[in-house]
Image (cartoon, helix red, strand yellow):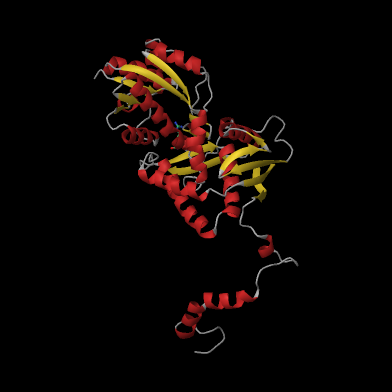
Amino acid sequence: MGARVVLAYSGGLDTSVAVRWMGEEWGCEVIALAVDVGQGGDFETIRKRALAAGAIEAEVIDARARYASDFIVPALRANALYEGRYPLVSALSRPIIVEELVAAARRHGATAVGHGCTGKGNDQVRFEVSTRALAPDLDVLAPTRDWSFNRETAMDYAAEHGIPIEQTKKSPYSIDENLWGRAIECGAIEDPWNQAPDDIWLLTRPPEGGPPAPSEVVIGFEAGVPVTLDGTAMPVHELIEKLGARVGAYGFGRIDMVENRRVGIKSREVYECPGALALILAHADLEGVCLERDVMREKSRLETRVAEMIYDGLWHSPLRRALDAFMLDTQEFVTGEVRLALDAGRCYVSGRRAPRGLYDHGLATYDASDTFRHRDAEGFVRLWGLSVETWARRQGAPPAGSEQ
Ligand code: ARG
């Protein structure tokens, strides 16, 4: 082969072995690219590890702010939850990683990009479909799909080739993390009946001595974008982190589900997404005040579609973009504040206000300031039910109590 390839590099065992293996088996020149989407870790160490594994170059891109503004915010606009529950942590990060891979491939004159996904998961779909959409001329290499290593033999390979690996504690889990949350697979939770062991929680672990005393937090939105936390303005990526830490301390944000992968496998997944779930909760509630009824109903049907498209690797597709244009259009007046109440294991909306919201106290109230025209109701309701009434008279069941 002998291609020059930009590999999405995490610093873990598989991608480190992949750097060397692609060189030895396929004669590739490997450029390692680590994209920081908020997964944490020491990126200078990761960069050095890639070079030690045999990469001809290693780069780190800090993509956190753009990940938040260009990927998380559109997902939040659509209240995107796959199968009603999963806020798409991993699914959202893949398309931005691919954008960075393609840009790096152009910078370095590479003819291929590579990833370390297996053949059973969704992430390979996301990497490859996005690459095809952005750069149909580039090849996609997936060494971990082609080799026959298991964890043990991959470690042996690393040892034989002097590839530095952190293998102190052998975690049985496969974990993927970024600003939007943390996804945990494998190990004991592959039996869907097994309760997730307590030690897997990181973002939703209450501090020693239990969760803090009940409190409240206020999120301010402007045109659907979260911009303030308790009145303090901050960039979205910071807001997500701060809010996540705040609500996570109460143990809020855990998801335990069996989901449908794109490749047809049902898989047991455990997630912790305190910031994402709190923001979606608040945003959707504010929409309840700000969106006209028909817009809100149609939007909720399309939200499901957006979530499925993101999950299925179709971020870079014409329909996803068109749906985003619709979502964006709905957000013009989604401006206001939502108050969340926090208590052990719970986070719930306890108030909302919006300067241009559609809640009209005069229309809603039952007290003396009522402005609703009660006399309009009688004729409206009669006509509303006229068709059903006609049906009942001519064809429907006889009224209760009457004899046949
Ligand atoms: N099931 C989730 C998804 O498809 C999470 C995948 C996480 N990947 C991992 N290596 N743990 O989006």
Position of 301 compared to 157: left or right?
right
Viewer-proximal residue among 311 and 134: 134
Is 137 drawn above or below residue 402 in the view shown?
above
Where does the image place residue 357, in percent across and percent down from the top left?
62, 54
Residue 239 occupies quadrant: top right
For the N terminus, give its image quadrant.
top left
Where does the image place residue 224, in percent across and percent down from the top left?
55, 45
Where does the image place residue 199, in percent across and percent down from the top left?
58, 30
Residue at (62% x, 40% y) in the render: 252
Q: How many marks?
A: 0
Residue found at the very far bottom of the displayed protein: 403
The reply to whether residue 51 is in sight is yes
Is 167 drawn above or below residue 398 in the view shown?
above
Is 247 drawn above or below residue 151 in the view shown?
below
Residue at (52% x, 30% y) in the render: 65
Image region (quadrant) for ligand 1:
top left
Position of 32 compared to 339: left or right?
left
Residue found at the very far left of the displayed protein: 1
The reply to whether residue 345 is in sight is no
Where does the image place residue 369, in percent across and percent down from the top left?
73, 65
